[in-house]
Image (cartoon, helix red, strand yellow):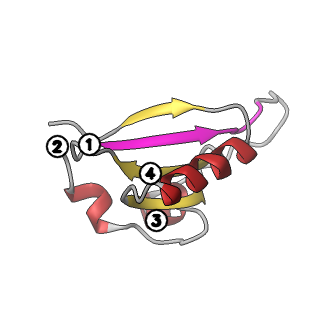
Amino acid sequence: MFHHVSFELESWNDVGHAADLITRYDISVDIGPTRHGITRGQTIYFFDPSGNRNEVFSGGYTYYPDNPTRTWDETEIGKSIFYYERQMNEAFLSVVT
């Protein structure tokens, strides 16, 4: 089984441009645009014409050794993956190709 493939873009603006193209060509959006809580990366998930889930993303944490460690636990799973929505999208876990 396959969950998704991810492509890194340069900036949040590029993720927004990808969202514009996805909308223009009536491509099925899965989730987003949104932000991941754990990585702070910006993202959008969509399905290609073959039904495969894809992600384009940008950004994320810059590591600084003196920053305090942030610990996520299972009570925050929704917020850790879908930061703005703050809840898990069950289809995200159940739809695979």
Residue at numbered disc 3: 78
Image point (27%, 45%), residue name:
49
**What's the mark number on residue 45?**
4
Q: Residues within 10 Å of mark 3 (few under 14, many from 20)?
A: some
Amino acid under label 1? Asn
The residue lying toward the viewer, choosing from 59 and 30, is 30
Name the image quarter holding the C terminus: top left
Image point (27%, 64%), residue name:
91
The secondary element bearing badge 4 is classed as: strand
Q: Are marks 1 and 2 in contact (CB under 8 Å)?
A: yes
Amino acid under label 4? Tyr
Name the image quarter holding the N terminus: top left
Q: Are marks 3 and 2 in contact (CB under 8 Å)?
A: no
Which percent across, then down, holds residue 29? 41, 60
* Mark toward the start of the polypeptide (3 vs 2): 3
Amino acid under label 3? Gly
The mark lying in front, picked from 1 and 3, is 1
Vertical placement of 10 versus 71: above or below?
above
Image point (85%, 32%), residue name:
66
The secondary element bearing badge 2 is classed as: loop
Q: CA distance from mark 3 to mark 4?
A: 16 Å
**What's the mark number on residue 97?**
2
Q: Are marks 3 and 4 in contact (CB under 8 Å)?
A: no
* Mark toward the start of the polypeptide (1 vs 3): 1
Q: CA distance from mark 4 to mark 1?
A: 10 Å
Specify start and end residues of the magenta stretch as a single range. 52-62
**What's the mark number on residue 52?**
1
